[in-house]
Amino acid sequence: MTAFDVRILGSGIVSRTAALALARQGLRVALQARPPAAGAAPDVRAYALNPASVALLTGLRAWDTLPADARTAVHDMQVHGDAPGARIEFSAWSQRVPALAWIVDAAALETVLEAAVAYSPLVTVTPEPGSAPLTVVAEGKASALREQLGVRFERHDYGHAAVAARLVADRPHTGVARQWFRAPDILALLPFDRPEAGRSYGLVWSLPAEQAARWREAPVAEFEAALNDATGGQAGRLALGSERASWSLGIARASAVSGPGWALVGDAAHVVHPLAGQGLNLGLADVAALAQVLAGREPWRALGDADLLRRYARRRAAGTWAMAQATDGLWHLFAHDQPLLRELRNRGLGLVNRLAPIKRWLVGRALDA
């Protein structure tokens, strides 16, 4: 008899959420997590979580533990094209939901989940968990075990990188998220309350790799000038409020997400462009689906049963495929500066903005991802 029912590989939000969700079912979980790298730079990432992700974290008693300034509700979203008047707006009021999303401090969420794991009597954090009937691979896009399992990870690099930082504006954000789609960059401002309550933003700026490298290292005054020029003052005067970080962007998908005794979740299974803010939501949806499948298994069926885990794979296939296609399609639509393509996409934004049923459908898909 093995000491654990499930072993989970990974050191991030998805792996810790999976550990807590499976422990709630009475399963003995070994979490194989690596310690943080010594001297690591402060984490400036901010995630946009949809209601489904918030519901999962609430059920695990992690959401309400977050500091008040580590989560900010998005009440409205404004998406701009690269022509005057090309714009689409979404609101929580028209969608009849409390918020379109919540912007969450990545480091704060990881801290809360780490504490919850430490207090769970059924979760053991260990560098060497040994074997278990089921292995959940949540190591991220560079997973070593996924490769050992013979799973192909089909990746296409966009040749772009994201520049992330915290910003402070000279006027309140009022819960409005703003995004600019232009050839060749995509810029998002996520309303936030750190470092200054009511006036901060999380920046995610997708740029060609050479430009991203330049703006990550540029003098502060030069970077701020470029940022304010790009946003046209629509969020007020923006100032840098943190260090800058950067990472390469692409789309990737594992050739299989389950097999006898194993399942992939999160970035180990799929990677999408952050333009829709759905990467972590997809990973948390994986966790919720896997937990539901395991909870509903027949009493005689083993945790690592291949047929059981195929249920998980089928449940997640359509949602992850659709989000990957949507983000990839949007990126290609706005990545090129051809005049005809620019006119079509900007006309499309204006048209969708006037069609309330389509807007509601689009928001509904994002809320349920």
Image (spheres, rainbow, N blue to C red):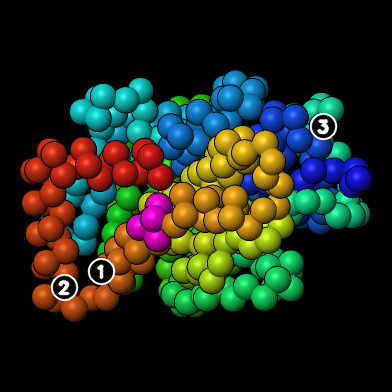
The residue beneath circle 1 is 333
Highlighted magenta segment, given as a residue range = 318-323
Q: Distance between the Cα atoms at labels 3 and 1?
A: 47 Å
Mark 3 closeness class: few <14, some 14–19, many ≥20 residues within 10 Å: some
Give the quadrant of the C terminus.
top left
Name the residue rendered at 82%, 51% in the picture.
132
Tell me the amino acid under the disc marked 1. Leu
The residue beneath circle 3 is 122
Say whether residue 192 is left or right of residue 78.
Answer: right
In the rendered image, residue 319 lying in the magenta stretch gets the answer: yes
Q: Distance between the Cα atoms at labels 2 and 1?
A: 7 Å
From this view, report whether residue 49 is shown above or below residue 286. Answer: above
Say whether residue 19 is left or right of residue 34.
Answer: left
Say whether residue 318 is left or right of residue 279.
Answer: left
Mark 2 closeness class: few <14, some 14–19, many ≥20 residues within 10 Å: few
Secondary structure beneath label 1: helix
**Are the residues flagged by discs 2 and 1 in contact, CB closer than 8 Å?**
yes
Asked whether the viewer can see residue 27, the reply is yes
* Residue 284 at x, y percent in the picture: 55, 43
Eye-nearest disc, 3 or 1: 3
Mark 1 closeness class: few <14, some 14–19, many ≥20 residues within 10 Å: some
* Residue 18 at x, y percent in the picture: 66, 41
